Image (spheres, grey):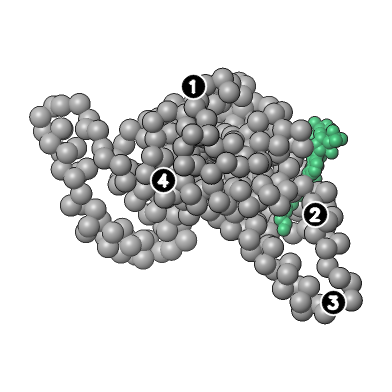
Amino acid sequence: MSFLARNCSNSSMPQYETIAVSVHSPFVYNVELNRPDRLNALNKTMWREIGEAFQTLSDDKECRVIVLSASGKAFTAGLDLTDASLLAQSGDEDEDIARRCQRMYKIIKSYQGSFTALEKCSKPVLCAVHGPCVGAGVDMASAADIRLCSSDAWFQIKEVDIGLAADVGTLQRLPKAIGSLSLVNELAYTARKFLAAEAKECGFVNTVYPDKESLLKAAFEMATSIASKSPVAVQMTKRSIVFSRDHTVDESLEHIATWNQALLQSEDLMMSAMAAATKSPPPTFSKL
Ligand SMILES: CC/C=C\C=C\CC(=O)SCCNC(=O)CCNC(=O)[C@H](O)C(C)(C)COP(=O)(O)OP(=O)(O)OC[C@H]1O[C@@H](n2cnc3c(N)ncnc32)[C@H](O)[C@@H]1OP(=O)(O)O
């Protein structure tokens, strides 16, 4: 890694086979897809480990923000097609269709859960995409809170090319992320690639950086800024943004009022108000 990262091998963080989780700096974590020789294609192990990692970090008081990036030349080539063919063959042809369907349903729900774990994670997730981001990669990026990319990034809702309807989040989240259902429809029906510039133009990514190095530098700078804020405030902000996306304005105002009747009494607000009143530097916030 080109940045000042410390691996978690000595911490209580679980060790993973297909992803690498490391601490970049205090409160800033990095989850890196780590099957570079397979272009970070998602096999069964990676699906499981992504879900587990984000669930674990959601409850980790040392973590306030997560940068999701990838090793090697691609962000991800999507579903591991060798695993997918295994999946299709794994059923006994003589087995009853209801039982085969139930097994497949459980796999789909479990894969959905792996990406929903990014959204359910109480900490903001910044997704830093370089190179190809194909199929399941778009589903995964769509579940992140903030997307950045390098100029060599490209995206593809590839599923129709392999006989699938995208089923792990793109069709549900992308329309809300970019605001044009017409464009989502075009991209999903044609499976055409869209490049970094178009991803920026349609609002899928915030900023395009010249290369992977500058992308990661910017992503960790943004993450460091977020980590310096009150974790009470940041985590409630994420909760409210995600809730508001899927509810009416009235419901969402009620939701934040209910939460903030407690959170407005937190020490973070008192300390911040005191610092502002006395023109002191921003306070250091306790772990949450
Ligand atoms: C329940 C279902 C849930 C989710 C469903 C998701 C659906 C999807 O994700 S659809 C998308 C599936 N992915 C693809 O169709 C992409 C296939 N790959 C490519 O098109 C290309 O690899 C590339 C991304 C355009 C990059 O091309 P290139 O730079 O020329 O690299 P390659 O030489 O092709 O690949 C290097 C190496 O990686 C292997 N590999 C690439 N993609 C996959 C993959 N998806 N699954 C497994 N392995 C993959 C490729 O075979 C090469 O291996 P070698 O052993 O070196 O030959």
Instruction: Tell me which numbered mark, 4 or 2, is placed earlier along the sequence.
Output: 4
Give coordinates of residue 120: x percent, y percent.
48, 54
Q: Nearer the viewer, mark 4 or mark 2?
A: 4
Q: Is residue 173 visible?
A: no
- CB contact under 8 Å: marks 1 and 3: no
Identify residue type, mark 2.
Ala
Instruction: Tell me which numbered mark, 2 or 3, is placed earlier along the sequence.
Output: 2
Q: In which quadrant of this rendering is ligand 1 seen?
A: top right
**Distance from label 4 to label 2 (Cα)?**
33 Å
Left-right relation of 117 to 272? right
- Residue named by callout 2: 84
Q: Tell me which residue sits at (69%, 29%) in the image.
A: 72
Instruction: Tell me which numbered mark, 1 or 3, is placed earlier along the sequence.
Output: 1
- Residue named by callout 3: 95
Identify residue type, mark 3.
Glu
Left-right relation of 233 to 153? left
Residue furthest right as drawn: 94
Identify residue type, mark 1.
Leu
Q: Tell me which residue sits at (20%, 49%) in the image.
A: 266
Please tell me in which quadrant of the rendered image residue 287 appears.
top left
**Distance from label 1 to label 2 (Cα)?**
37 Å
